[in-house]
């Protein structure tokens, strides 16, 4: 089969590789129908998440058709069209039983790496380095899905592939960001990042009763989506002082809930950004975290900062004093998609969560390297490239 493989920092290729096969009774093999680029993939392509190896297959946001199931798979049949959670979870361990699927103890076969870096390992993730299990990703003709009964969700007929695919990752991630933020009716919510994840977090915040949702970014095409499709407000961080603007909107109090949906490769203007870039290039720290710092400083006293952006290691100039003295609640994590996906598919089918607009660049799998180039540089209004094997 064909697959998109990592060949080193900023080098991707479409190669012929072996077809996946069932390795465990609980596995399924899927024919991939659609697989999207996610901001998380950029952190791999750009070399900021360690433990990638040449030949690793990328991709974790996908939907497919079941072509083979292991003998212990009970809820799926060959021919089912399913969306698959980007996070792999066993569904039975202590963490899974509490709905914290991205903390699964049994789905990551390489826990030693995570234990060394972080104290404990996180769950397995498709196509996301050897730290998260070294699983082959979904940018391929076929993919093996471990714990298939717990990760695959049948897609309602009315939802097209290129809209449903986001229920794998961007939609549940955005929902979790808003859920973790403890949004109450009437809240003002600020969201950093107008990518697929930030837009879905903004929509979730609205559905949870936020009175005003303000999304911060710099790309006009993304702002047009936020305003016209999501119906939220926008702030351009290259044109205004974000902190001042957020205080002005909230009569000096600061947003009640702040959601960070940018991650470790944040862009910014000014000296602090130059400092972050230089330290990251020298590997003196691993994260460029301007939006995280901004969120903690702007958030109202006693508010919540919910972090969706991916971080891998150590961040410098973390405003711990602000977080402590303002009594903030910080929530973070990889998404617990298995907990939300059935409810979200229903909402998507009912038209409550628009996603089709995120697919700005549908492409054949062969053109994945070009798709990544567009996505990485946000060229031609690219929000997500979606590959069709
Ligand atoms: N927690 C999870 O489970 C999970 C799941 C999916 C994605 N993610 C992470 O979410 C983040 C966003 O993903 P995406 O797919 O939307 O990515 P994306 O690259 O499409 O969007 C990121 C956006 O952030 C904006 N940005 C950069 N610097 C900024 C700044 N200083 N202020 C405001 N906006 C800024 C960019 O302009 C861009 O529009 C990534 O870090 C990704 O790894 C996390
Ligand atoms: Zn992702
Ligand atoms: Zn588990």
Image: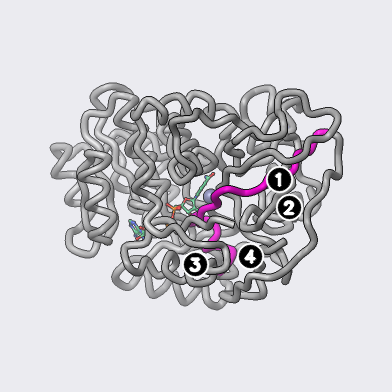
Label 3 Cα crowd, 10 Å radius (few <14 / some 14-19 / many 20+): many
Counting the numbered discs, the total is 4
* Ligand 2 under 8 Å from disc 2 Cβ: no
- Where residue 363 appears, as percent x and y from the top left, is 48, 61
Residue under label 1, please give it.
124
Disc 3 from disc 2: Cα separation: 20 Å
* Magenta stretch encompasses residue 40: yes
Circles 1 and 2: CB distance less than 8 Å? yes
Q: Residue at x 69, y 70 (%)?
A: 15
What's the distance in space between the residues labelled 1 and 2, CA to CA? 7 Å
Q: Is residue 250 magenta?
A: no
**Range drawn in magenta:** 26-45
Q: Name the residue under label 4.
A: 4
Quarter holding the C terminus is: bottom right
In the displayed structure, 35 sits above or below 285; it is above
Which residue has dot 2 on it?
A: 135
- The span from disc 1 to disc 4 (Cα, nearest Å) is 19 Å
């Amino acid at each position: 089969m064909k697959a998109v493989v990592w060949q080193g920092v900023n080098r991707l290729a479409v190669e012929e590789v072996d077809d996946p096969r069932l390795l465990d009774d609980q596995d399924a093999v899927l024919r991939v129908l659609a697989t999207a680029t996610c901001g998380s993939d950029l952190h791999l392509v750009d070399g900021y998440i360690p433990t990638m190896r040449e030949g690793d297959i990328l991709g974790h946001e996908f939907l497919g058709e079941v072509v083979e199931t292991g003998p212990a798979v009970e809820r799926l049949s060959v021919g089912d069209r399913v969306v698959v959670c980007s996070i792999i979870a066993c569904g039975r361990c202590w963490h899974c039983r509490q709905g914290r699927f991205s903390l699964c103890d049994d789905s990551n076969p390489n826990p030693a790496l995570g234990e060394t870096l972080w104290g404990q390992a996180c769950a397995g993730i498709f196509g996301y380095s050897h730290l998260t299990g070294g699983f082959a990703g979904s940018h391929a003709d076929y993919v093996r899905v471990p714990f298939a009964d717990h990760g695959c969700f049948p897609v309602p007929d009315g939802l097209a592939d290129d809209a449903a695919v986001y229920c794998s990752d961007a939609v549940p991630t955005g929902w979790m960001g808003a859920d973790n933020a403890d949004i109450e009716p009437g809240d003002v919510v600020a969201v950093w990042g107008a990518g697929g994840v930030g837009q879905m977090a903004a929509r979730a915040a609205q559905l949870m009763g936020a009175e005003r949702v303000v999304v911060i970014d710099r790309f006009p095409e993304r702002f047009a989506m936020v305003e016209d499709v999501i119906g939220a407000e926008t702030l351009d961080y290259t044109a205004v002082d974000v902190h001042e603007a957020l205080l002005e909107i909230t009569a000096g109090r600061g947003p009640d809930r702040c959601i960070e949906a940018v991650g470790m490769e944040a862009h910014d203007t000014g000296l602090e950004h130059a400092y972050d870039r230089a330290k990251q290039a020298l590997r003196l720290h691993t994260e460029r975290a301007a939006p995280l710092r901004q969120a903690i400083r702007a958030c109202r006293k006693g508010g919540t900062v919910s972090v969706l952006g991916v971080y891998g290691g150590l961040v410098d100039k973390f405003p711990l004093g602000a977080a402590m003295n303002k009594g903030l609640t910080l929530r973070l994590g990889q998404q617990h998609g298995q907990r939300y996906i059935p409810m979200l598919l229903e909402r998507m089918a009912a038209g409550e969560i628009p996603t089709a607009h995120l697919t700005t660049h549908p492409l054949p799998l062969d053109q994945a390297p070009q798709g990544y180039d567009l996505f990485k540089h946000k060229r031609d209004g690219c929000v997500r490239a979606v590959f069709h094997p």
